Image (tube, rainbow, N blue to C red):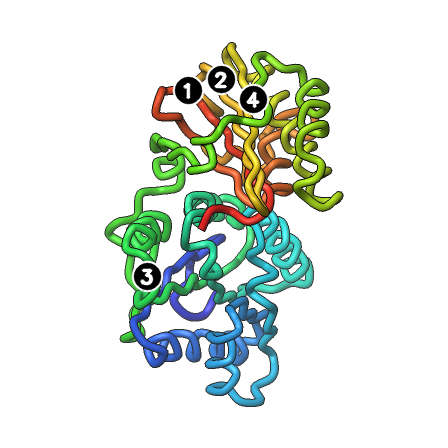
Amino acid sequence: MRPGAAAGHQGYFHEAVCYASDEELLGVAVPFLLGGVQAGEPTVVSLGERTAGLLRDELGDVEGIVFQAGGAVYARPAVAIRSYQHLLAGYAARGAGQIRVIGEIPAFGLGTTWDWWARYEAVISRAYGAYPLWSMCAYDTRTTPGHVLEDVARTHPRNAEPDGSHRPSPGYAGAVAFLSQEHVVTPDPIERTAPLVDLFEPAPGEARRALAGALHAHLDADGFDDLLVAVSETVTNAIEHGTPPVRLRCWAAPGRLVVKVTDAGPGPGDPFAGLMPAAKAPDGGMGLWLAHQLCDHVTFGRTPEGEFVVRLTAGTPLS
């Protein structure tokens, strides 16, 4: 029997903690973590430096709690999923009846790249569903934008409250419904300039060569190679699964490259595409997932003109 609020629950018990003061965060997190230690459960903190420091000061020398750098864990959503799946599988293989994690998305993820982190919060209901995980996702209402908190309510089935209660979220939409909603991709300001590359119906090799010729000076070797792989996979995906015409455009700004691949199709039928490998992998369907591993921001949806678009950003996303 799992102890605590997740008692009797099978699989992933996913909660949000929306707190308005440091005291409220500690009031939820400390009992959660100490309960895990007392039950002999793997207990993990994946918070930023400031909030992790609050917990360290409050808890003192308690043993049995693993602190890992939240900024490293949450570098990219697809990387976070892969990292956590590895962590959870290891604990489960060693017989853990419940695993406790409290984490937070870094501040940079709550800005212009929030769209893929919102998808992450919805996707993990499936990605971690096979494990006896009880997690709390912490959001500071003093600094978190209002539209982010609205998405938090829609992607978390439950809330852990400062008064110690655990309640269903009245705003929870369900993963499939949230991920299937129409998303219009707002043009990046850099798109107001003429693209450095503009190709219609490119083959993947043609796309790689065009980008290599125009953009090699804008990123370090590793970052540029990653972008080329992501672009190649995205173009292949558009050719195989999209509807003609396929178009590729690329823009460059100091410290940032933006690549857009559009087609006239409806987009992926799998709402979990990108952040989880497609069901037919490894025989195919890996393109969007690889792009999410390799780029600094991936967003997809519809352009204002109605095309399906995948936009890949390498370097510093727009702030």
The three-letter code of the residue at mark 1 reads Glu
**N-terminal-most mark, 4 or 2:** 4
Residue mark closest to the camera, 2 vs 3: 2
The span from disc 2 to disc 3 (Cα, nearest Å) is 40 Å
Q: Which residue is mark 4?
A: 248
Q: Which residue is mark 1?
A: 307
Left or right, 162 with reference to 4 = left
**N-terminal-most mark, 1 or 3:** 3
Which disc number belongs to residue 263? 2
**N-terminal-most mark, 1 or 4:** 4
Q: Secondary structure at mark 2?
A: strand
Residue mark closest to the camera, 4 vs 2: 4
Quarter of the figure with residue 213: top right
Instruction: Count every numbered label the image shows and give the total.
Output: 4
The span from disc 3 to disc 4 (Cα, nearest Å) is 42 Å
Q: Residues within 10 Å of mark 4 (few under 14, many from 20)?
A: many
Residue 55 pos. (x, y %): 48, 80
